[in-house]
Image: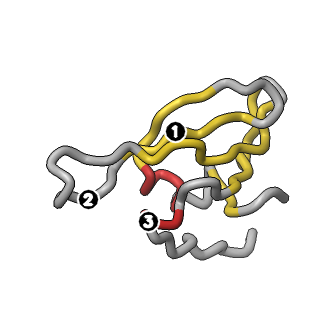
Amino acid sequence: MAPVIPAPRLNPDKLFKSKWTAVTPANKEKHFIVTRVFLPEPPATAIELIELEAVHSGRSFSLHWRELTDTLQWRQGWL
C-alpha cells in the first residue's frame, strides 16, 4: 500500500510565487508557479482563484486555490 501523503496546509495570502509539481505531468508540463492571485470582489471576501504557469511551456490557466491541496494531483515545491 502506498504511503498516505497529507494535504499541505495552505495560506491563500502566501500563494503568490509558490511552486508546485504535477503528480501526473501532461505535455512535459511538470513544474508550475503561481503567477497571479485573483483578488475577490468585494475585497472583504476570501481569495478563490489563482493562475498557474507551466515553467516548461509558459502556458497559464486558472483554478481554485484549494485544488492544490489534492495530493493526487499536486505536490508543493519542485520535486
* Vertical arrangement, residue 56 with respect to residue 5, above or below: above
Whether pointer 2 and pointer 1 mark residues with C-beta atoms closer than 8 Å, the reply is no
**Residue 52 occupies quadrant:** top right
Whether pointer 2 and pointer 3 mark residues with C-beta atoms closer than 8 Å, the reply is no
Residue drawn 55% across and 70% down?
7
Q: Residues within 10 Å of mark 2 (few under 14, many from 20)?
A: few
SS at mark 2 in the image: loop
Residue drawn 74% across and 62% down?
77
Q: Amino acid at mark 3?
A: Asp
Tag 3 or tag 1, which sits nearer the N-term?
Answer: 3
Where is residue 78? Give x, y as percent: 80, 57
Residue 5 horizontal side relative to residue 16, left or right: right
Where is residue 38? Give x, y as percent: 38, 43
SS at mark 3 in the image: helix
Residue position for label 3 = 13
Tag 1 or tag 2, which sits nearer the N-term?
Answer: 2
Q: Which mark is residue 27?
A: none
Quadrant of the image containing the C terminus: bottom right
> Alpha-carbon distance for marks 2 and 1?
16 Å
* Vertical arrangement, residue 54 with respect to residue 79, above or below: above
Where is residue 27? Give x, y as percent: 78, 24
Tag 3 or tag 2, which sits nearer the N-term?
Answer: 3
Residue position for label 1 = 51
Where is residue 17? Give x, y as percent: 63, 54
Q: Which mark is residue 46?
A: 2
Q: Amino acid at mark 2?
A: Ala
> Alpha-carbon distance for marks 2 and 3?
10 Å
